[in-house]
Image (cartoon, rainbow, N blue to C red):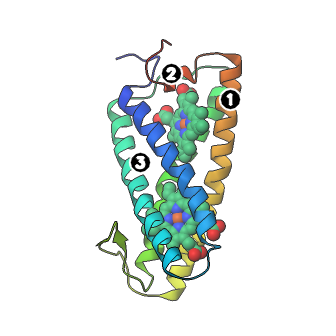
Amino acid sequence: MNLQRYSLPAIILHWVQAAIVLWLLWLGWTMVDMPKGAERTAVYGLHKSMGLVALLLVVIRLGWRHRSPAPVPLGQGWEVKVAQLTHRLLYIFLLCAPLSAYLASSFGTYPLKFFGIEIIKAGWPDEGINAVFKLAHQVFVWGGAGLVALHVAGAIKHAIKGDGTLRRMLPGGGV
Ligand code: HEM
Ligand code: HEM
């Protein structure tokens, strides 16, 4: 096993999930301002389905990470600590943002559908509990967006320095 690079499945999972999550953030903030109607309902449905895909992906990703650990960190002591903490918090965001939303929907009045197929809810209609998980979803997505900004800024800084950090998260290429 090469401890200097991410494995190909880890790289594919990272970029597919990064694209989905960035798109979900944009879609989430756009859809809440849409006027009520068929279009808004369709966009909400798509957001929920893709959000559940993101949840599935992070579970697969953590499973893969357990089997194939991340490469040894690059950089100075404090940089390594900040990067490791950010990665840990990113995983918490990736789990808690969709989970809190799934729970919010579980305690909502509408059926929960995954690309048109009704799926099991973990609760019953309850306005109070629904509001708590909705708020949790908002807190996680705002916190997560801040972390993503920090993470991308870190990646750009490493790319400018040319220390190989970005390259090891890209397919092909050496260390
Ligand atoms: C990583 C996954 C997800 C991300 C990044 C994400 C992102 C967002 C964002 C940015 C918003 C707007 C928040 C605001 O009003 O300030 C939002 C709202 C919402 N999301 Fe998600 N979401 C994800 C997963 C899910 C899932 C899995 C569901 C449902 C099963 C869901 C259901 C909703 C709903 C219903 C709203 C609207 C809440 C309201 O009307 O106040 N989201 N999401
Ligand atoms: C343009 C956007 C992005 C760039 C350039 C980027 C770049 C990178 C790089 C270079 C690494 C490896 C860091 C290292 O080896 O120390 C990494 C790891 C990681 N990225 Fe990103 N990333 C981006 C977006 C995202 C997004 C949107 C998420 C999720 C919300 C994310 C989540 C993660 C996580 C969790 C890791 C740690 C992987 C592990 O060690 O298990 N990234 N990213």
| Residue 97 vertical placement versus 161 (above, below) | below
Q: In this view of the protein, which residue sits in the foreground, 71 or 152?
A: 152
Residue for badge 2 = 168
The answer to which quarter of the image holds residue 9 is top left
Disc 2 under 8 Å from ligand 2? The reply is: yes
- As helix, strand or loop, the secondary structure at mark 1 comes to helix
> x%, y% of residue 57?
38, 48
Amino acid at pointer 1: Ile
In the displayed structure, 3 sits above or below 152; it is above
Dot in front, 3 or 1: 1
Q: Is residue 61 left or right of residue 31?
A: left
Q: Are marks 2 and 1 in contact (CB under 8 Å)?
A: no
Q: Secondary structure at mark 3?
A: helix
Q: Residues within 10 Å of mark 3 (few under 14, many from 20)?
A: some
Say the numbered circle drawn on residue 70. Answer: none
Tell me the crowding category of disc 1: few under 14, some 14 to 19, or many 20 or more residues within 10 angstroms, Cα based.
Answer: some
Queried on whether the Cβ of the residue with tag 3 lies below 8 angstroms from ligand 1, the answer reads yes
User: Residue 19 placed where, x, y %?
Assistant: 51, 45
Give the CA separation, mark 3 to mark 1: 23 Å
Residue 33 x/y as whole percent: 65, 73
Q: Amino acid at mark 3?
A: Val
Residue 156, which numbered label?
1
Residues 125 and 39: in front is 39
Please report the residue visible at 45 percent of the width from the left and 82 percent of the height from the top: 108
- Residue at 68% x, 32% y: name it: 154
Residue that label 3 marks = 58
Name the residue: 44% across, 81% down.
107
What residue sits 53% from the left and 57% below the top?
Answer: 24
